[in-house]
Amino acid sequence: MFLDTFYKIQKYCHHDGSRHSHSPSDSNGGAITTQKSGTREIQVVRRVLDINEKMANQNRTLFAAKGIFVLNVMSSPGSGKTTTLEKTLSQITSEIKSAVIVGDICTTHDADRLAVSGVPVVQINTDEFGGDCHLAAHVIEKAVGGLNLDDIDLLIVENVGNLVCPAEFDIGEDARVVVLSVTEGEDKPVKYPLMFRECEVALLNKVDLLPYLDYDKQKAIDFIHQINPGMPVFEISAKTEEGFKPWVDWLRGKVRQKAESMAHRAESMGQRGKI
Ligand SMILES: Nc1nc2c(ncn2[C@@H]2O[C@H](COP(=O)(O)OP(=O)(O)OP(=O)(O)O)[C@@H](O)[C@H]2O)c(=O)[nH]1
Ligand SMILES: [Mg+2]
Ligand SMILES: [Zn+2]
């Protein structure tokens, strides 16, 4: 069957019945209980993020050992993450061995769409563990279990559509990209600054719609740079593939750099071995 042949869908279930994403169980399977007082809440949230960071570093070490460049793609719902990835994959799969992990609260719609590219796709549905609104490092660690990491140079993670908390959760990625579409209004970078501060690159998507909108593109770019000076902003249309070359070239360069740094490390380890 097509689904079995071309991709794997995995659902990760919480068994402790915990509710929202930022409960402490989010990061360690329920070992810490939520505290009521404000100060304790802050301490517990800090601990959740510390535990997440440890897991993220483990993931990062694994990805580094395998020479895989990992990209975390984030945005509000509907900005065009999946469409951008569909088009990006169609341009790179002949030269870069890629795989995708996609997070959604419910459905396998995005995995269905991305699997058409022929790359391995793992869908994570967070509904069964409280409808988490972001992907955390431990979820990525489980998801990569469904992939052959020796056969991948690029792992793309499409995070859950949400412009807020995915930015707080390191998953062990090498780089983060935020997609902002022109239908969302110019001011999102200043309203949701963490996302724009934490990302390395912004994709300003749906530029094909500009003729139909009262959208001040320069104002949006200025707001992005107010939060993250010098951040590259690639203006694209995932529908028409306008503006894709600089974006895809950026991605190619990153994958190449990672492979080169791995080769360099292997070479220096080999030389050390000879001494
Ligand atoms: N006109 C136009 N429509 C676009 C473009 N990119 C995406 N869309 C449309 O926007 C809608 C949402 O696109 P998706 O790619 O599903 O967005 P997403 O960010 O993956 O959404 P979630 O995964 O639900 O957060 C779809 O109807 C797309 O066809 C674009 O560049 N131009
Ligand atoms: Mg999507
Ligand atoms: Zn969240």
Image (tube, rainbow, N blue to C red):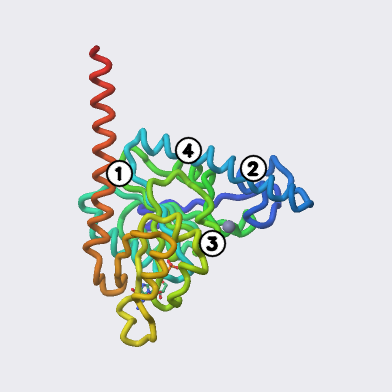
The quadrant of the picture occupied by the N terminus is bottom left
At label 3, counting other C-alpha atoms closer than 10 Å, the crowd grade (few under 14, some 14-19, many 20 or more) is: some
Q: Amino acid at mark 2?
A: Arg
Say if mark 3 contacts mark 1, CB within 8 Å.
no
Q: Amino acid at mark 4?
A: Asn
Q: From mark 1 to mark 2, how far is it between C-alphas?
A: 32 Å
Residue 214 in percent (x, y) is at 39, 86
Image position of 127 (left or right of 73): right
Query: Which residue is tagged 1?
Result: 153
Circle nearer the N terminus (3, 1): 1
Q: Amino acid at mark 1?
A: Asp
Say if mark 2 contacts mark 3, CB within 8 Å.
no
Query: Which residue is tagged 4?
Result: 57
At label 2, counting other C-alpha atoms closer than 10 Å, the crowd grade (few under 14, some 14-19, many 20 or more) is: some
Which of these two is toward me, 56 or 192? 192
**Which quadrant would residue 220 be assigned to in this image?**
bottom left
Query: Which residue is tagged 2?
Result: 47
Classify mark 2: helix, strand or loop: helix
Identify the mark at residue 113; answer none if there is no mark: none
Residue 100 in percent (x, y) is at 38, 53
